Image: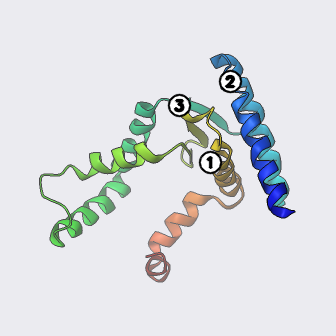
Amino acid sequence: MRKTAFIAAILLHVAACSSLRNTSPDQSRAGLSKKIDSIKQVVQEIRGRSFLEDFRVNVKTREQLREIIVRELEREANAQRFEKNRKLLLLLGLIRPDIDLKKAVASLITGHVAGFYDTEEKELNLLEETIDNPGVEGTIAHEVLHALQDQHFHINAMVDAIRRDDDRKRATY
């Protein structure tokens, strides 16, 4: 019985998602807005916390997401950590000296991401080519949860605290 209910839920989910596929971009974006609002409600109910404020949702091309990722990798604190890791990988012989590791990492991330919540800008960025795909709701729910966590627990402050605390830092590796 559980298996049948699970399969029925999946089929309903796929049918609902596929109904957005043959729509204009404006209709698709309106459908996306409704989808996000619905997901936000579910996340709030499950987590028992409400959003303190709304956040922006942006639909970006793959190249636009790549630019955001590169910008994040180039931030000073990230650049310093990145350079230490690059030196370690070179020392261990895991990468060649001629590889542009920043470019390779940005391409790898960009090639596998459907969206992310940006804790600096307080916005959800979604990959344009995936917004009508079945299953994108999982990515949206995951990133909406990060927005909720950020509003209540200030993710960047937590990460900075971990970076300054040697015991916590060791525990994360």
Does 127 sit left or right of 6 as displayed?
A: left
N-terminal of the pair, mark 2 or mark 1, is 2
Q: What separation in Å lies between label 3 and label 1 (alpha carbons)? A: 13 Å
Per the image, the residue denoted by label 2 is: 28
**Residue plotted at (69% across, 54% down):** 145
Give above or below for 60 relative to 123: above
Between 104 and 8, the one lying in front of the other is 8
Q: Residue furthest bottom?
A: 167
* Label at residue 81: none
Residue 168: give x, y in percent of width and height: 50, 79
Circle 2 packing at 10 Å, graded few (<14), some (14-19), many (20+), is some
Residue 1: give x, y in percent of width and height: 87, 62
Please state which amino acid type lies under the numbered disc 3.
Glu
Please state which amino acid type lies under the numbered disc 1.
Thr
N-terminal of the pair, mark 3 or mark 1, is 3
Circle 3 packing at 10 Å, graded few (<14), some (14-19), many (20+), is few
Does 95 sit left or right of 105 as displayed?
A: left
Between 52 and 96, the one lying in front of the other is 96
Per the image, the residue denoted by label 1 is: 139
**Residue plotted at (71% across, 53% down):** 148
Residue 121: give x, y in percent of width and height: 56, 41
**Residue plotted at (75% across, 35% down):** 15
Per the image, the residue denoted by label 3 is: 129
